């Protein structure tokens, strides 16, 4: 009997995602998943690296930005990384995004895309991104906005956990993102262990001279959750 793979489930999740109505907050949603260009990227990526039913450790960020996964549909992956590291050719404008740049340095240091994605699943608390006044906007930037999003966030997380999540989770962002996710996890009991790591954008924007030490910090935690 045919059994859907981890990758099939991810593709279906993004294909049928229902974006929240946040217009009353004067916020726009970044949801590129219905575009044919994006679907080519996501289908190629998830079929290549998730064509199995293995459980994985989830690495969860905040929400997509305008220039990385907001264009490719692949979490933490800009068009350059998608082509150069993942071998997924695409026609999207090749613009380097800081978060993606750092993540793929970690991927390379861990042993490459095959080993990394065979062990980990990258996603975000909100699978869609947001902008306000033309700038990236985080799901937690306003309490009323967050409260309105909670049902969508919880449903999205639970759908993805069903793909095959291990008991430990890694949260990117040791401030608000870790705090909010820990509160949600305490309420819903999704994961037994929650580990936090500095967000890639913080590292690349404010600690660029110490990138190698942050990569080591990532590797230490990633190897720990797999042991």
Image: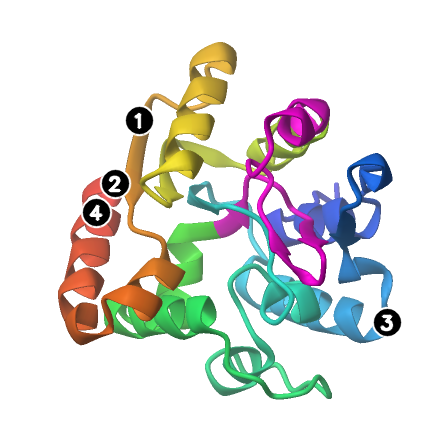
Residue that carries the numbered disc 4 in the rendered image: 221
Closer mark to the observer between disc 2 and disc 3: 3
Residue that carries the numbered disc 3 in the rendered image: 36
Q: Earlier in the sequence, mark 4 or mark 3?
A: 3
Q: Position of residue 114 (x, y in %)?
A: 42, 68
On screen, residue 82 versus residue 108, left or right, reads right
Residues tagged 1 and 3 counted as in contact (Cβ below 8 A)? no
From the viewer's side, name the closer residue of 4 and 7: 7
Mark 2–mark 3 distance (CA, rounded to whole Å): 36 Å
Residue 99 shows which numbered tag?
A: none
Residue that carries the numbered disc 1 in the rendered image: 193
Q: Earlier in the sequence, mark 2 or mark 3?
A: 3
Residue 225 shows which numbered tag?
A: 2
The segment highlighted magenta reads 122-151
On screen, residue 215 versus residue 140, left or right, reads left
Instruction: Establish if 127 lies above or below 160.
Output: below
Instruction: Establish if 12 lies above or below 196.
Output: below
Mark 1–mark 4 distance (CA, rounded to whole Å): 12 Å
Instruction: Answer few, some or many: residues within 10 Å of disc 3's Cα (few below 14, many 20 plus, some between 14 and 19).
Output: few
Residue in the image at 17% along x and 75% along y: 209
Q: Is residue 146 magenta?
A: yes
Residues tagged 1 and 2 counted as in contact (Cβ below 8 A)? yes
Residues tagged 4 and 2 counted as in contact (Cβ below 8 A)? yes
Mark 3 residue element: helix
Q: Position of residue 62 (x, y in %)?
A: 51, 46
């Amino acid at each position: 009997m045919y059994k859907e793979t981890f990758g099939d489930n991810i593709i279906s999740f993004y294909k049928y995602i229902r974006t929240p109505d946040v217009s009353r907050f004067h916020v726009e949603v970044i949801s590129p998943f219905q575009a044919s260009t994006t679907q080519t990227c996501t289908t190629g990526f998830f079929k290549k690296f998730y064509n199995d039913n293995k459980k994985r450790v989830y690495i969860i960020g905040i929400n997509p930005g305008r220039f990385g996964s907001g264009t490719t549909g692949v979490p933490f992956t800009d068009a350059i990384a998608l082509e150069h590291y993942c071998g997924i050719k695409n026609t999207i404008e090749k613009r380097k995004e800081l978060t993606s740049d750092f993540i793929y340095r970690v991927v390379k240091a861990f042993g490459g895309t095959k080993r990394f994605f065979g062990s980990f699943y990258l996603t975000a608390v909100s699978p869609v991104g947001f902008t306000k006044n033309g700038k990236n906007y985080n799901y937690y930037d306003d309490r009323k906005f967050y409260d309105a999003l909670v049902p969508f966030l919880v449903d999205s997380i639970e759908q993805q956990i069903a793909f095959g999540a291990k008991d430990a989770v890694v949260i990117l962002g040791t401030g608000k993102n870790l705090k909010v996710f820990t509160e949600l996890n305490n309420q819903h009991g999704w994961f037994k262990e929650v580990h936090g790591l500095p967000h890639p954008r913080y590292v690349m924007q404010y600690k660029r001279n110490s990138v190698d030490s942050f990569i080591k910090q990532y590797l230490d935690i990633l190897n720990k959750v797999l042991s």
